[in-house]
Amino acid sequence: MKISYHGHSVVKIQTNTHTILIDPFINGNGQTDLHASEVSADAILLTHGHNDHVGDTVEIAKRCDALVIAPFELAEYIELQGVRVHAMGLGGTVDFEFGKVKFTQAFHSSSYTTENGQWIYTGMPAGILFTAEGKTIYHAGDTALFGDMKLIGERNNIDVAFLPIGDNFTMGPEDAAYAVELIKPKIAVPIHYNTFPPIKQDPNLFKEMVTNAEVQVLKAGEQVQLSLD
């Protein structure tokens, strides 16, 4: 399995047989190395409906015939755009041919703003647990720190956790470092920072505060270095 980070909250997972994108915000993302017209995917997982997470989902999904997996209301809205979807709810788990997906809690908001300025309610925000080929990845989405992260850590053997550190809209570095204590991943990767002025952060400060996991600060396009065990 190859797991790579592509700026903001964009994560790509490549198994032996499939490519999965999480929150593919590409056009308008000055931190990414990807091009929406070139990236491919078999499945797209969405944490919530904000434009900087839905991003280029519809364009990519239509071109690749990718399945979009999202919280119920967001999936319903995406389906109206002519895309294949699978709607899920928080706590639900589904075994797809490319891996197991479970949606967890996230404390944030969720709406999509159309080109004409209309706001569409897109349901509850979520985090994602993805398991394939013996590895479990936790993408927290946009979230505040919350106590039930401890349950997520206790009930799942998490290899890699992608955690927002940008502050202002989500956890900042200090709360994200405490989240690592609760989740207990083997590797923590900071995301959702430096894309816009309100979320400017130094990821190395987050790294210095984490004492119970390896922190990998990745540039766009870099892969998580997984252990061989």
Image (cartoon, rainbow, N blue to C red):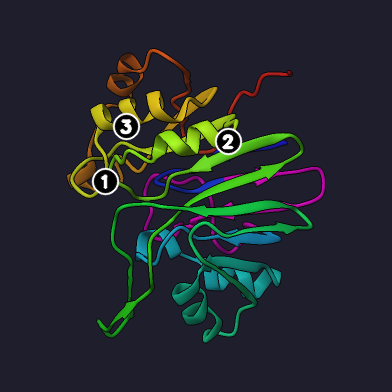
> What x and y, as percent, mark residue 29?
38, 53
N-terminal-most mark, 3 or 1: 1
Q: Within 10 angstroms of label 1, few (less than 14), some, or many (20 or more) residues?
A: many
**Residue at horizontal 50 percent and vertical 45 percent from the top:** 33
Q: Within 10 angstroms of label 3, few (less than 14), some, or many (20 or more) residues?
A: many
Which residue type carries mark 1?
Thr
Q: Which residues are magenta?
A: 12-40
Q: Which residue is mark 3?
A: 176
Q: Is residue 13 above or below residue 225?
A: below
* Residue 25 counted in the magenta span: yes
State the quadrant of the C terminus: top right
Say which of 47 and 82 sits in front: 47
Dot 1: element: loop
N-terminal-most mark, 3 or 2: 2
Dot 3: element: helix
Q: Is residue 104 above or below residue 66?
A: above
Q: Which residue is mark 1?
A: 170
Rendered image: mark on residue 156:
2
Dot 2: element: loop
Q: Is residue 143 above or below residue 28?
A: above
Q: Is residue 40 left or right of residue 187?
A: right
> What x and y, as percent, mark residue 62?
63, 75
Q: Quadrant of residue 84?
A: bottom right
Q: Within 10 angstroms of label 2, few (less than 14), some, or many (20 or more) residues?
A: some
* C-alpha gap between disc 3 and disc 2: 18 Å
Which residue type carries mark 3?
Ala
Q: Which one is closest to the eye, mark 3 or mark 2? A: 2
